[in-house]
Image: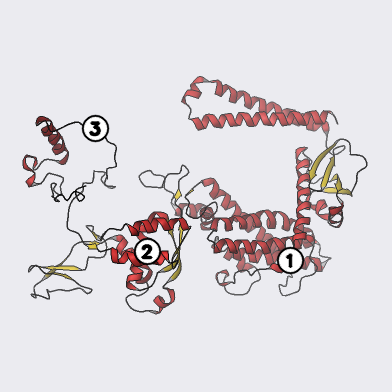
């Protein structure tokens, strides 16, 4: 406001917080006492029209918590207009691009409204300002240290201030590689490809690196600026020492491993957006690492006699399916990474490894691995297991470098390290839409059978008769691949295109193109299952009584936090839903 109205800049407060000598009767007063006295004087002289309360931000020192007062002082500044112009042009011309693009506005808005940059700081640590003073009044700024005044030959004293932290940081892209010498490292790595940083330091650091690079190297420091969000606590608050909500990454690494922490921070994250840190997600990533480790150990235990150079035999439907899914995963993950969609790339790898390779393909391959009589089929299963696992580890390596390296080293491979292994090449020739469609309907059918067996508690090892009414389109697929139903669903399938009479006392499920019937006669002990369900119903009754009693307690409802009350109500709904399902099952069993 003072600058806007051309008011003189007068220092009225001393460094110790007392009022300066030229403040008249207020001289020597503490700043807070002065304010009270000033208001009182205005009242007494009838100069005070009114007093209004205003809420506004007041800066406080983060160490001693006292109010920070503005103070006019002599500082070193950099003239920013000449530096800002080429930095603006570099982005507007497209030589430097922000990802996501929306952060370009923040960058340009700051530079287009730039003010001169105060680069001196009164702190103990940092690069000293390269300025020296002589008693003769000479001020010398020099690239090299000096000991005497070039004008009078007298002794000089260096400015005690240090450079602003961001001034030093802005030199990072080239000063770390031998600048101002024209080193081999500088030629090799300047400019670099991508800068990865948070949106909160776009103008503090990113802009400064750009205009410093253009000024001293006459070239942009990087081509892309990939902006990520901040990691906040589970309540969405910024982590800080004052709140005590910080997460020490070393503690997470100690308990769960570095790969787990890395994968947690990458998944569920979109470029430029903040993410919340949940311990449950860390545990989920830990479980994923365990899944990879256990699946890989199974494969390694079953590679006896395997020769990766040998030609694979005839691929089964499951082989063609997983090779097709793997080929698509390579293409999708590569495209996601090139678009800086790291979270999406990690999600696709998670789903492919866990849901498709581990949960389905390994299970389909077990029968062939254990069949020592059919050497060709066993060798083909070994090849597909090895080929897909090795390539998937290479895709996953940027996200989880340690576990992937450890497993890759035990697999048949060429090269010293997974770090230098080639990125898996596109495998368009393996994409097989027909195999994917056929395997999908088989898997859906298997899941339907498993769900029905689970509902009536059929023991996992007990085979069950299953009747399938299959459309003409899929009948041959089921006939040729009925072994998958036998091994993965513990089913004895009877496959037909038309069923003259629907089976009595059978559970039913419908999958696209298939009707699945699970006859219950002789499969379960109706009396035993009825008793089990009634016992479960009674246990739910007791839990419901506890919950409803709690919610009926006026004291509890008045004092408990809203989230605790909502949790209890959710439990109540869940119990009632379970009782409804049990009643339906009891009615069904009564009619068998």
Q: Which residue is mark 2?
A: 88
Given this view, does label 1 or label 3 mark the residue nearer the observer? 3
Q: Residues within 10 Å of mark 1 (few under 14, many from 20)?
A: many
Q: CA distance from mark 3 to mark 2?
A: 43 Å
Left or right of 73 in this view: 405: right
Question: How many marks on residues?
Answer: 3
Given this view, does label 1 or label 2 mark the residue nearer the observer? 2
Q: Which residue is mark 1?
A: 382
What is the residue that sits farthest to the right in this orientation?
Answer: 500
Which residue sits at x=80%, y=46%? 461
Which residue sits at x=39%, y=70%? 220
CB-based contact (under 8 Å), mark 1 and mark 2? no
**Quadrant in the rendering for residue 74:** bottom left
* Residue 308 seen in the current view: yes
**First along the sequence among labels 1 and 2:** 2
Q: Which residue is mark 3?
A: 52
Left or right of 258 in this view: 309: right
**First along the sequence among labels 1 and 3:** 3
Q: Residues within 10 Å of mark 3 (few under 14, many from 20)?
A: few
Given this view, does label 3 or label 2 mark the residue nearer the observer? 2
Q: Is residue 549 above or below residue 321?
A: above
CB-based contact (under 8 Å), mark 1 and mark 3? no
**Quadrant in the rendering for residue 155:** bottom left
């Amino acid at each position: 406001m003072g600058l806007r109205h051309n008011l003189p800049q007068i220092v009225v407060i001393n460094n110790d917080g007392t009022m300066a000598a030229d403040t008249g009767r207020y001289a020597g007063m503490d700043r807070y006492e002065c304010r009270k006295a000033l208001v009182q004087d205005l009242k007494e002289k009838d100069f005070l029209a009114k007093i209004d309360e205003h809420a506004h931000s007041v800066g406080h020192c983060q160490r001693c918590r006292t109010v920070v007062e503005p103070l006019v002082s002599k500082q070193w500044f950099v003239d920013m207009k000449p530096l800002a112009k080429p930095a603006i042009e570099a982005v507007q011309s497209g030589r430097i691009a922000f990802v996501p693009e929306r952060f370009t506005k923040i960058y340009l808005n700051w530079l287009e409204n730039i003010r001169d940059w105060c680069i001196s700081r009164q702190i103990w640590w940092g690069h000293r300002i390269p300025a020296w003073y002589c008693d003769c009044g000479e001020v010398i700024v020099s690239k090299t240290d000096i000991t005497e005044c070039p004008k009078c030959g007298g002794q000089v004293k260096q400015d005690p201030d240090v450079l602003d932290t961001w001034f030093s940081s802005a030199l990072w892209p080239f000063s770390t590689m031998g600048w101002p010498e024209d080193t081999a490292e500088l030629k090799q790595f300047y400019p670099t490809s991508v800068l990865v940083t948070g949106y909160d330091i776009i103008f503090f650091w990113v802009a400064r690196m750009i205009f410093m690079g253009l000024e001293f190297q006459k070239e942009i420091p990087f081509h892309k600026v990939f902006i990520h969000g901040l990691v906040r606590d589970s309540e969405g608050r910024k982590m800080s020492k004052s709140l005590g909500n910080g997460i020490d990454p070393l503690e997470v690494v100690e308990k769960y491993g570095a790969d787990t922490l890395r994968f947690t921070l990458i998944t569920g994250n979109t470029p430029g957006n903040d993410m919340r840190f949940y311990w449950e997600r860390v545990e989920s990533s830990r479980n994923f690492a365990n899944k990879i480790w256990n699946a890989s150990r199974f494969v390694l235990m079953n590679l006896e006699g395997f020769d990766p150079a040998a030609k694979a035999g005839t691929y089964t439907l499951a082989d063609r399916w997983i090779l097709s899914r793997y080929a698509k995963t390579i293409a999708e993950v590569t495209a996601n990474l090139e678009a800086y969609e790291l979270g999406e790339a990690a999600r696709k790898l998670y789903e492919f490894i866990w849901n498709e390779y581990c949960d389905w393909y390994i299970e389909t391959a077990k029968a062939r691995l254990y069949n020592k009589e059919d050497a060709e089929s066993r060798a083909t299963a070994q090849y597909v297991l090895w080929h897909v696992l090795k390539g998937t580890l290479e895709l996953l390596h940027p996200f989880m470098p340690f576990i992937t390296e450890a497993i890759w080293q035990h697999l048949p491979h060429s090269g010293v390290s997974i770090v230098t292994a080639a990125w898996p090449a596109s495998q368009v020739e393996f994409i097989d839409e027909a195999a994917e469609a056929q395997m999908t309907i088989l898997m859906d059918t298997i899941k339907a059978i498993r769900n029905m067996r689970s509902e009536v508690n059929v023991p996992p090892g007990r085979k069950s008769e299953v009747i399938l009414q299959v459309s003409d389109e899929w009948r041959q697929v089921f006939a040729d691949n009925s072994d998958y139903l036998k091994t993965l669903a513990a089913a004895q399938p009877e496959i037909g295109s038309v069923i003259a009479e629907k089976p009595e006392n059978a559970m039913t499920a419908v999958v696209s193109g298939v009707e699945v019937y699970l006859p219950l006669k002789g499969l379960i002990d109706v009396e035993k299952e009825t008793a089990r369900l009634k016992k479960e119903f009674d246990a739910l009754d007791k839990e419901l009584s506890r919950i409803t009693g709690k919610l009926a307690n006026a004291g509890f409802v008045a004092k408990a936090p809203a989230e605790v009350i909502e949790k209890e109500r959710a439990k109540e709904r869940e119990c009632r839903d379970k009782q409804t399902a049990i009643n339906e099952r009891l009615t069904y069993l009564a009619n068998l």
